[in-house]
Image (cartoon, rainbow, N blue to C red):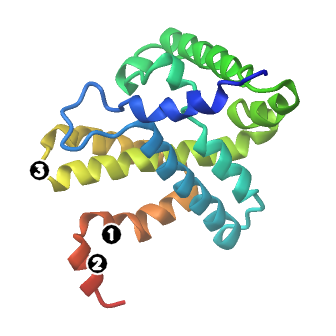
Amino acid sequence: METWDFFAMMSRMKYINRWGLMRNTINENIAEHSLETAMLAHCLAVLKNTYFGGNVDSGRVCLIALYHDASEILTGDMPTPVKYYAPEIRDAYKEVEKVASQKLVQELPEELQEVYRAILMPGEEAEELERIVKAADKLSALIKCTEELQMGNQDFESALEATRKAVEEMHLPEADYFMEHFLPSYRLTLDMQAKREK
């Protein structure tokens, strides 16, 4: 009987921690981050379609986001300051991610590979969707920074400012809308959220 490793590999996302160079109050793994990024990417797509004249496939955006860090199962999480230290490092790491994604796709039956290749390795036709996923990825990082600062962890202060600036520089109205209308609630406690009058 033939067996396939793809989903067992995906389940290992929970073992890959993020923010390796930072002191964390609460550790975050790529499974948790991927779920949050998928929810945020779906939201951004809906915002784009509802308020900003978009016509993007929110379901496909959500799927791409759900698997956007899958290659890190094989590569580990490279901290952002290292990944973007120099163009040569960034480009080399992109190639490593591509090889890792291809390896993961090969862990599926041949009949399923094209379906998952289009999710793990979206082509040029998905450029707009990937921009939304990138914004959602940054928003997830911004939320993490906000939560860490709320717990008194000043190690995330400069990361918060850099990440906020990165989102703003993307010039995506749906991401700006999220930061204005949804992000402030992440600074509230559950009790404060429950008591707040709408």
Q: Residue at x 58, y 53 (%)?
A: 41
Check contact, mark 1 vs mark 2: CB within 8 A: yes
**Pointer 3 residue:** 152
Q: Residue at x 61, y 67 (%)?
A: 47
Q: Give the distance between the C-alpha atoms of the residues marked 2 and 3, in whole angstroms.
A: 20 Å
Q: Which amino acid, mark 2?
A: Gln
Picture layout, residue 31 above or below residue 191: above
Residue 171's x, y, as percent?
Answer: 55, 51
**Element carrying mark 2:** helix
**Pointer 1 residue:** 185
Q: Residues within 10 Å of mark 2 (few under 14, many from 20)?
A: few
Answer with left or right where residue 110 lies relative to residue 68. right
Q: Nearer the viewer, mark 1 or mark 2?
A: 2
Check contact, mark 1 vs mark 3: CB within 8 A: no
Q: Give the distance between the C-alpha atoms of the residues marked 1 and 3, in whole angstroms.
A: 17 Å
**Pointer 2 residue:** 193
Answer with left or right where residue 174 lies relative to residue 15. right
Rendered image quadrant of residue 71: top right
Q: Residues within 10 Å of mark 1 (few under 14, many from 20)?
A: few
Q: Which amino acid, mark 1?
A: Ser
Quadrant including the C terminus: bottom left
**Element carrying mark 3:** loop
Of residues 8 and 76, which is closer to you in this image?
8
Rendered image quadrant of residue 59: bottom right
Residue 84's x, y, as percent?
Answer: 44, 21
**Element carrying mark 1:** helix
Q: Residues within 10 Å of mark 3 (few under 14, many from 20)?
A: few
Answer with left or right where residue 59 lies relative to residue 135. right
Mark 1 or mark 3: name the one nearer the start of the chain. Answer: 3
Q: Which amino acid, mark 3?
A: Gly
